[in-house]
Image (cartoon, rainbow, N blue to C red):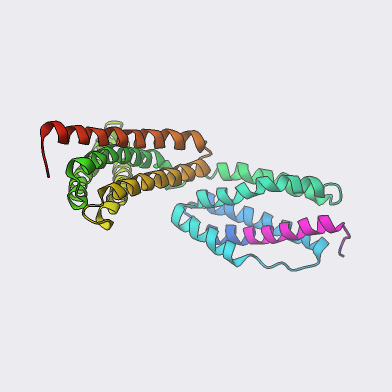
Amino acid sequence: MRKEVSAQAMSIIKMMQKNECTEGVIYGKVAKFVKGENNKQTLLRLSMEEKAHCQIWKIYTGIDMKPNRLKVFWYTFMAWILGFTFAVKLMECGEEGAQKKYEILAKEVEESIQIRQQEEEHEQALLAMLDEERLKYVGSMVLGLSDALVELTGSLAGFTFALQNTRLIALSGLIVGISATFSMASSEFLSAKSEGRTDAMKSCLYTGVAYLITVVLLILPYLLFGVTQYIPALICMLGIIVVIIAAFTYYTSVAKNQPFGSRFAEMAVISIGVAVVSFFVGILAKKFLGIDV
């Protein structure tokens, strides 16, 4: 039997019913491909809870709500590419803004209090799921990423004015970058081995891959711009640095509940600061050594 509520409450209920229906489907789909029985069962429990909430809202709307297919595809895709922890935590972040709506509903809909309590429990359940492999190696990825940003940014900035030829800069950067990739990966392997860790190879691979991807992205502008367009290439590279730092910091801030602003500012200031200093070092080296390439 359908219950009567105000127009404002009905509008909120319809929106929530749509969200609960959609998120129930997302949790169910992600549960099909996650590793670990505990992760799978937790996601299935969350899926059932969301669907149960959807049925409660149906008492008021009288509508069999269909899930938002685009949202289902997007979050399932992100879970597959970036990891289920990041995807579901990002999705749950949206529920923080729903608390004010629950306060409005509490005056007319008694069940909303129970639903709100269960929604808050979701966060705790998700925190207990942080045993995803890629999150265990975030430290290794940060090591590879930050080292590549600082070291290669400095090298490319120095090469930019010293060589003034995008192809030579790209070649020099590629040689430095690949050598540094193997150096950093092997150092991480030896460090993990010395600590008695059994995952030394995986840690080494995560570090090396993060470093190599950063190398490729930073060198790319020097391959895309003309031979004499080394200044635009440098500016583009600095823009890529900011994007890389912002993307990775956002990922870790969502997946591991870490602050975004301070970590982003710290990495950005260090990387770009090194680039500026290295650029002037290149100017001085060219001037005092009297080398003209």
For the image shown, how many numbered marks are present on the structure?
0
- With respect to residue 104, does 278 lie above or below? above
Q: Quadrant of residue 277?
A: top left
Q: Position of residue 265 (x, y in %)?
A: 45, 35
Q: Main secondary structure of the magenta part?
A: helix
Nearest the eye: 148 or 113: 148
64 horizontally vs 74: left or right: right
Nearest the eye: 87 or 178: 178
Q: Is residue 2 visible?
A: yes
Nearest the eye: 253 or 31: 253
Q: Is residue 198 visible?
A: no
248 horizontally vs 127: left or right: left
Q: Position of residue 12 (x, y in %)?
A: 77, 56
- With respect to residue 110, does 71 lie above or below? below
Q: Position of residue 217 (x, y in %)?
A: 32, 51
- At x 30%, y 46%, the residue is 234
- At x 87%, y 57%, the residue is 5
Query: Which part of the image, by quadrant, shows the C terminus?
Result: top left
- At x 31%, y 35%, the residue is 276
- At x 43%, y 45%, the residue is 248
Q: Position of residue 36 (x, y in %)?
A: 48, 51
Query: Which part of the image, by quadrant, shows the N terminus?
Result: bottom right
Q: Quadrant of residue 16?
A: bottom right
154 horizontally vs 171: left or right: right
- With respect to residue 104, does 52 lie above or below? below
Q: Which residues are magenta?
A: 3-23
Q: Is residue 16 magenta?
A: yes
Q: Is residue 50 magenta?
A: no
